[in-house]
Image: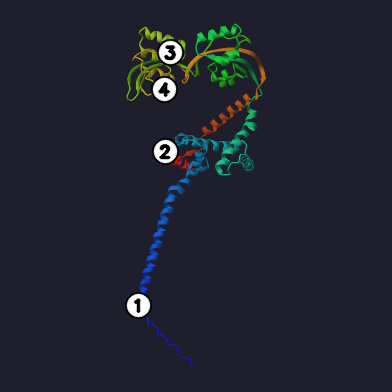
Amino acid sequence: MAKKRDEKPRREVTKRQLSHWQQQRKKQRIVLSVGTFIIASVLVVIGVGWYVSHYQPLHQTVIKVNDVEFNMDYYIKMLRFHGKDQSVEYRYYLADKVVQRIEQDELIRQGAVKLGISVSDDEVKDELKSRELPLSRDYRDLVGVELLANKLLDNYFDEEVPQFAEQRHIMAMFVESESQAIEVRDRLEDGEDFGELAGELSLDSFSRAAKGDLDWHPQDILADVLATSVPGEHAFGAEVEVLSEPIYDEDKFKGVGYWLIEVLERDEEPDEAHVQAVLLGSEEEAQQVRSRLEAGEDFATLVEEYSQYEYSDEETGDLGWLSPGEMSSVFDEFVFNSELELETLSQPIRDDATLTKGGYWLVRVLGEDDNREIGEDDRDFLKAQVFNEWLSLLWDDPENQIDSYLDSEQKTWAVEQSMKG
């Protein structure tokens, strides 16, 4: 007969032990609840911080054109686009220009709608795909306004530009002084080639690149091409094939000037020099002024009368203390020559890194036509002029409400965010 297994006595839980366990569990629940609350609080703080520092600023309206709003995120993306591969300093420079660009593009969109000109979403998407660009709003807007401007030029403003106009075909070159113009004119009269001399000597970039042959143009376009009305005014009143006398143009800029310099003081540690100087528009003028200085005339008087350097003291020509690199290389070469005696007046120093005004034109009219068809490039130029005039009217229209809410601190923040993309 099998033995009965001895049964262990059941362990009885006392009231005291039960109370102790219940207290422990209560403490655990309290600790867990507190821990959960702390973690949740930290997450809330982080979330609120992110919302306040990033989400909220990115979604606040910073530009408004009539009823269309642009937020900070859009502005940053435009900064990033227009400042691509550029330094943070350049993007600071762009900050205001990008605001204006956003406002202008929206004015074009809204103005085009009033003229019945639009671009479909499919046209924009097709163009973006062909250029392998993102389909985001910023890229859609950039490409869309470009397509819209082309439609305005080709389908609307084209009708406002004439097909025919009075035109002249001219040769022209621009030189620095009357004596040089007389010398060049004599060479032309002796049979030298106008194109070769213009390509070598003209100080106007357009006529130099074209070797003097400016082709056919209406008078107003000729003035815009050359940034002066002087040659056109002569050409539209001159006889064909007659070479002009030297024609003075006091306002035309050229990329050359001539310095007369005196070093008043020098400090070797650091390398600095106290300088007074006068900038003249031609070597001929510089020689004349130098002769007057050598004859004892007052430097300050001649500076006031002749100098074209706007950053010096207008009354004395004093440029203050300069370090190497602040001016051009030819300027530094004279000023920081250690063997140069102080207060030595330089010979005229030619500087191709500066701008001066004034010079002389030589013009020959090769052909005239009172009603010639305007070339494609000139018509594009005229259409662009009409487009810009229309755009100016949009800016000036009091019905267009344009607002920017960006302050300098926000622009700085936006630039910094644009560098992270």
What amino acid type should be assigned to the residue bearing mark 2?
A: Ser
Q: Nearer the viewer, residue 250 or 3?
A: 3
Q: Residue furthest bottom?
A: 1
Measured Cα–Cα span from mark 1 to mark 4:
93 Å
Q: Give the labeled residue for mark 3.
A: 348
Please give the label number shown on residue 373: none
Q: Nearer the viewer, mark 2 or mark 4?
A: 4
Q: Residue 408's mark?
A: 2
Mark 3 → mark 2, Cα distance in angstroms: 46 Å
Nearer-N-terminus badge (1/3):
1
Helix, strand or loop at label 3? It is: loop
Q: Which residue is mark 1?
A: 17
Marks 3, 2: nearer the viewer: 3
According to the picture, the residue beneath numbered tag 4 turns out to be 327
Residue at image position (42%, 56%) is: 44
Q: Earlier in the sequence, mark 2 or mark 4?
A: 4
Cα distance in 3D space between marks 4 and 3: 16 Å
Q: Earlier in the sequence, mark 1 or mark 2?
A: 1
Q: Amino acid at mark 3?
A: Pro
Q: Earlier in the sequence, mark 1 or mark 4?
A: 1
Q: Position of residue 271 (x, y in %)?
A: 35, 23
Where residue 308 sits: x, y (%)? Answer: 43, 17
Q: Nearer the viewer, residue 178 or 16?
A: 16
Q: Name the residue type under label 1.
A: Gln
Q: CA distance from mark 2 to mark 4?
A: 32 Å
Sooner in the amino-acid sequence: mark 3 or mark 2:
3
